[in-house]
Image (spheres, rainbow, N blue to C red):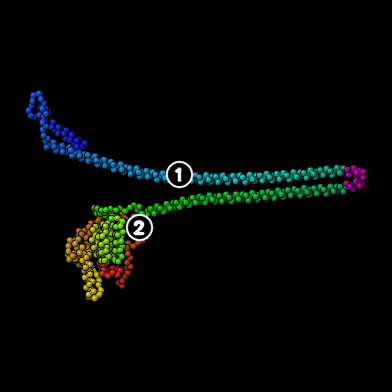
Amino acid sequence: MKTAALAAFCALTLAASAFAAMPPGQTPSAQSAGPTVPGVLLPSQPSPPSPEQIELNKLTAENMISDQKTRKKLQQLNDEREGLRAEYELGALKQKSKMAALEAELEAATVENKLSGEKRHHDLAALQAEIDKTAAENKLAEEKRKAQNAALTAEYDLLWAQNRLAEERTKAALAQQDAELKRLNQEAGLSAAKNKVALLDLVQQLEKLKLANDLRAEQQREQQMADEKEKRAIELAVKRIELDERKLGYDKLLMDSRMAKLKSDLELRDKKWEWKKEANVDPTYMDQPYAKGRLVVSDRRITMDTPIFTGVSDYVTERLHYFNNISTQPIFIVIDRCPGGSVMEGYRIIKAMQASKAPVHVVVKSFAASMAAVITTMADKSYVYPNAIVLHHQMSTMNWGNMTQLKEQLELAREWERRLHLPVAKKMGISLEEFRKKMYEKNSNGDWEEFGDKAVSYKWATDVVEEIDETGFLKNPDTQPAQPKQMFWLNEKADEKGQRYVNLPRLDPFDFYFIYNPDRYYR
């Protein structure tokens, strides 16, 4: 379709250019050349396109092709924008799902609080019912007491009626005696006196019985009231104890709820504190970590800030092997300050670097001398700050033994120098003798030191780095226990002159210390 459209467009363009090339007032039929036949209209011959028209057609075709490419790029950008929009909508849906889960938890907590409130209301209603029941029982007891008092009153009235009856009978008997007294004056008077005395005794006995009955009834009533009062006091005390127990249970539940909330708050605060202890981001891993003066260092990082003595090569090489077994992303040996050290230990580090499947990048921030300088120079990729110092010098050592042994040790030292310095000299493009000569040209002690930017020009390092982005430090150093910066401790001492020094470990056989030690700090 595109080819056909392009051909049609070119044909139209050619026709338009041919028409535009005609003289004024001339039509296409009048411009046609060739013989004419009467009665026959012969087709006109098109004139060949001019070079400008050909160039115009070419530019037009290129513009159409460029337009198609632009539309394709726009379509790709639209597809990418749709993909980003879909990712954003997916993130929004996930966030909405999390909010829905949180709202469900909140609603569950609200329902639980409501149920707890209803339960407390039910408990209070039950307690009120028990109090009402107690009041009803007290009222019933009071009614019983009144019934008992009524019975005693009825009994008292009965006794009083019986006493009246007895009194009436006594009066009747006295009337008969009066009749007899009338008949028998002396005897009747004596008999009346006796009866009167007997009556008085009976009245006194009745009064005593009445008083005794009243006293007994009052005592019974008081005892009953006392018993009732004591019973109500006991019941009230029991109810109060039960109420206090329920209050204590409610207070305990309330306290447990508060303690649970406080515990939850404390745990949340601890989690937040734990979260703040780390950066909570992943280190940055880049296949090409260096660009335009900026180096990105990941957590595939090995620190070497100590003299290189026995054990340091194990520390470095084990980590090189470990990182290689994970992936082939770059590994970084970071040197802050290293004066050098054992040639055997350093050579093991160089061979591990050369055998590494993952590229090994050496970074010098402050100072690398002697064996550390050789490691930096022999690395495929090494970086130095502009003001960092890299120092090469001849290997120095102390030997002990007879003349033959000293000669053997000297030859071994020369061989180590050849094996370590010759690759450095070759990388610089000079011979070993020229390398040794330049050491003394730069410094009368043979300590050839250069700043980082100058060291790169001598090929002691591959690049000068202006910025180092350490993405592997993910934990807050203020929350970590204090650790020595160096990998291994060396016990510092003072000699008889008060000068500070440390004793380096004893060397293994056939080994030498290749270390920068102008003030004999390392002994």
Residue 181: in magenta span: yes
Q: Which residues are magenta?
A: 176-192
Residue shown at the point (86%, 47%) measured from the top left: 195
Relative image position of residue 282 (x, y in whole percent): 33, 52
Q: Which residue of the protein is positioned furthest toward the left in this rendering?
A: 35
Name the residue tied to disc 2.
Answer: 477
Under mark 2, the amino acid is Pro
Relative image position of residue 88 (x, y in whole percent): 33, 43
Name the residue tied to disc 1.
Answer: 107
Residue 200: in magenta span: no
Q: Main secondary structure of the magenta part?
A: helix
On screen, residue 522 versus residue 47, left or right, reads: right
Q: Which residue of the protein is positioned furthest toward the top in this rendering?
A: 39
Where, by quadrant of the figure, is residue 103 drawn? top left
Element under disc 1: helix
Under mark 1, the amino acid is Glu
Relative image position of residue 383 (x, y in whole percent): 24, 57
Where, by quadrant of the figure, is residue 416 drawn? bottom left
Relative image position of residue 413 (x, y in whole percent): 22, 69
